[in-house]
Image (cartoon, rainbow, N blue to C red):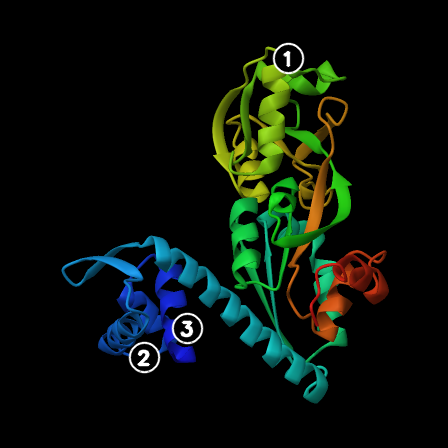
Amino acid sequence: MKLHQLKYIHEVARQGLSISAAAEALHTSQPGVSKQIQMLEDELKLQIFQRHGKRLTGITEPGRHIVKLAATVMLEMQNIKRVGDEFSKVETGTLTIATTHTQARYKLPSAIKQFIEMYPHVKLSIHQGNPSQVTAQVASGEADIGIATEMISSDDRLLCLPCYEWNRCVVVPKGHRLIDAVPLTLAKIASFPLITYDFAFTGSTIVSKVFHDAGVMPNVVLTAIDADVIKTYVSLGLGVGLIANMAYDEERDKDLVRLDCSHLFPPSTTYLGIRKDAFLRGYLYGFIELLAPKYDRRAVDEAMKVYRTY
């Protein structure tokens, strides 16, 4: 059994059973990947993948266990490299952040600006997605840290630290009839076409539940993952927008009017998620503290120590 064989089956599983995609991601040849997987199966005397001709169609029962263990091996190899880097290259490396558009656009810029100034030799990468995608990227090790709403805290592979709470507001064009209808009610909002976040977002699920529990059916005409897109279509007069409070900028959105509706919805919590078994580089501690000052290195270590084996 060779380490690169485990790496190959891990990547094939990660690429949806596409050997060609795995070969491309690993910068090697497709026949080489296929041969090494076959050699590992021969050595173990079992099939890891189900096949139809030369095409992989699924993962066998024993294969699922092996793929899971291979993923653990890959993560531990990554941890070993991080330990080496931490003690030989203190302020160099990479930091991959997975987060939603709203967090990346409105909440992270200040922390990221400070981080780049403090760690100029660390390469920073931001992956955007909905909370379930953010969670999956951190859980798989593709991202070092995830920043998203409640959904991320439900994955037991991750340690999630609550960073801050936020609520929502309604945005409308100047002169809109809803401006004179404050304080807002769910019925008043539902009397106009509604533009809000994609329902893959936990925040939107909370919104849906509030409307449902009140017996009010909103007329959702458009959903988007991007608050700027929502505001664009509100400006065009296609409906009223329901967005995160943080996504309204008084200077940039001066053609829109913000109406408070925080009394109608429970607050949402943004969490910072990291793998429980990950080795954290010093600069990752630094980023966490920039984003959420209450979590200095001691506080993070205290939260992590119950899971650590090193």
How far is mark 1 from mark 3, CA to CA?
A: 51 Å
Q: Earlier in the sequence, mark 2 or mark 1?
A: 2
Q: How many other residues sit within 10 Å of disc 2, few (<14), some (14-19) or many (≥20)?
A: few
Residue at the disc numbered 3: 7
In this rendering, the answer to whether 3 lies above or below 68 is below
Q: Residue at x 53, y 27 (%)?
A: 237
Q: Nearer the viewer, mark 1 or mark 3?
A: 3
> Most extreme residue toward the front, as rendered?
45
Callout 3: SS: helix
Quarter location, residue 66? bottom left
Is 34 positioned to the left or the right of 287 in the image? left
Q: Is residue 307 above or below residue 163?
A: below
N-terminal label among 3 and 2? 3
Circle 1 Cα neighbour tier, 10 Å, few/some/many (<14 / 14–19 / ≥20): few
Residue under the image location 54 percent in, 69 percent down: 75
Q: Which residue is mark 1?
A: 214
For residue 28, the mark is 2
Pinpoint residue 232: horizontal percent, then vertical percent: 54, 39
Element assignment for label 2: loop
How far across and how far down the image is residue 296, in percent?
84, 63
Q: Is residue 261 left or right of residue 158?
A: right
